[in-house]
Amino acid sequence: MNGGYALMDALHRHGVKHIFGYPGGAILPIYDELHKAESRGWLKHILVRHEQGGTHAADAYARATGQVGVCFGTSGPGATNLVTGIATAQMDSVPMVVITGQVPRAAIGTDAFQETDIFGITLPIVKHSWVVRDPRDIGRIVAEAFLIAASGRPGPVLIDVPKDVGLEEFDYTPVAPGTAIPAGFKLPVSPDPAAVAAALALIRQARRPLLYVGGGAISSGAHAAVKQLAERFRLPVTTTLMGKGAFDEKHPQSVGMLGMHGTAYANFAVTECDLLIAAGARFDDRVTGRLDGFAPRAQVIHIDIDAAEMGKTRLPDVALVADVQAALEALLAASAQDNSEGRTEAWLQRIDTWKQHYPLVVPAPEGEIAPQEVVVALRELAPDAFYTTDVGQHQMWAAQFLHNGPRRWISSAGLGTMGFGMPAAMGVQTAFPGEQVICVAGDASILMNIQELGTLSQYNLPVKVVVLNNGWQGMVRQWQESFYGERYSASEMTGGMPDFAALAEAFGVRGVCIEERSTLRQQLQEALDHPGPAFIDVKVRRNENCYPMVPPGASNAQMVGLPSHPELAIDTSRHCHACGSTTESAHLFCPSCGAKL
């Protein structure tokens, strides 16, 4: 067999059902074998219109299914077009196998036509990478690639295949999944019983605990364990942008998302808590705000599969290095006879008071349609849909107002990649053809990968793209208004703005434009009911800002855009029980006597 066949056979043996990609000269031997593999019914290839779209589709396919996503690109510009999507997957810990064509082995290093060192370019943004020098290594490399991508903290890997490797014939010996173990590879360790006992001791004594859940809980499938632990100890639960779906946001103990555009009550809770239980979260700067003001009164339990995260930003009192689900199940097993014993009731009541006074607000239905109205309408019309987003204000409104189940929230969090949403929706819809998939986007970000309307049309993927169109790069405009003296430099998008509905129709996609509140829900429902893909352009208020917001350099408790309730203000000072002096609430130790506060 030749190298191209060996690659397709190896992918088939690893259960790959869909590949997202775009052909080119150096990868043609692989695409020739791909054609034969499709005719055998092994898998299906989705032709994207830009390689970046392929990476985002494979990324979202992985997020939604929990399986490894796969994408192809050719050498040179095809490979470099993959870089943004690879970095997106790396930042959000998404398992993905990226396969690139390369110039023939003899031409590597000669500046041959369409040659780039994609191995070197991507070194900082992959878990591991290979250049295949011998076709006999293909089976082993593919097996190692899938193992590395999906194990431990997941992430993308790269396999670069020179053109002549794809053509060379040899005696092929298949390699079964899981049988090729890379040198130095280690499986995640089991939770340390001593760390589990130490964590439980802190949970049992806490009066104001907060369970802070990140994307690691989604990756490990820990949502049931999160719920059980929260209910057993009556813990309020906040999630990161990546952690949405790990805990039911309609649950009375949910405080929603925390951080820069999180709920006021989540940010107040993290500022006031005395124990922070971080499960699969990495203390991202958009979550913490000013670091010395983040959970300043709290002891910290940090649960993460990646030991490198321990102490990177916040030094934990207890570090539990393990898979999140395994760690939570160990905590549950060790506390089977426990309950909250009423310790947290006063704390939950205080949080409920914050919820009543500082709810997420939908503006009054006056004048132009408010973007929040659109998101709330989608939530009510399509409560069980998979939602993908682009990046910007619309992303934050979607995060605030949508209530998602596990793996039904797909958004670029760490890298904040504009243009992610629509190709991501393609990946989710490919994985789940019978499910409802909705992309919430902005008028600026949707243009980043607008060409993928062609992919939606070709494969009749019934994705519904809903654009909150305010004629701006919305988040950029909000920052320029708030922090740059209203100097709106290069952020207005009305010049050259296409007629989105007409553009969608030109691709063969149903185009809808909504301008009046009176027809908003009816037109949304009609578009959602359309059997094929649809693009819904909703004209919304041009100057609506996303609140609450933690300004740069502020602590989470110092949000703007909130109504004033001075009687509920959190304490700004702390008193030392050892010497009686007063200091700022952010301090952990008394500056006068050094005692722990």
Image: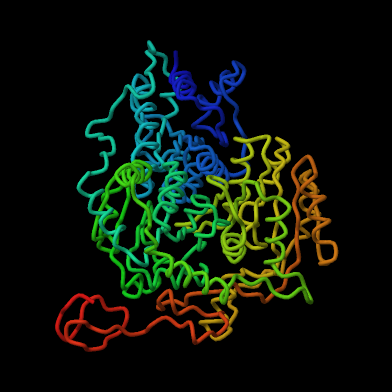
Question: Residue 293's spot in the image, x, y percent?
Answer: 35, 75
As drawn, is 540 to the left or to the right of 192?
right
Q: Please tell me which residue lies in front, 188 or 354.
A: 354
Q: Please tell me which residue lies in front, 518 or 184.
A: 518
Quadrant location of residue 96? top left
Q: Residue furthest bottom?
A: 581
Residue occupying image coordinates x 51% and y 82%: 483
Residue occupying image coordinates x 56% and y 75%: 358
Residue occupying image coordinates x 55% and y 49%: 410
As drawn, is 567 to the left or to the right of 199?
right
Residue occupying image coordinates x 43% and y 38%: 112
Quadrant of the snapshot with the C terminus:
bottom left
Question: Residue 397's spot in the image, x, y percent?
Answer: 61, 64
Q: Is residue 327 above or below residue 17?
A: below
Q: Please tell me which residue lies in front, 199 or 413.
A: 199
Question: Residue 466's spot in the image, x, y percent?
Answer: 70, 55
Q: Please tell me which residue lies in front, 11 or 249.
A: 249
As drawn, is 13 to the left or to the right of 312?
right
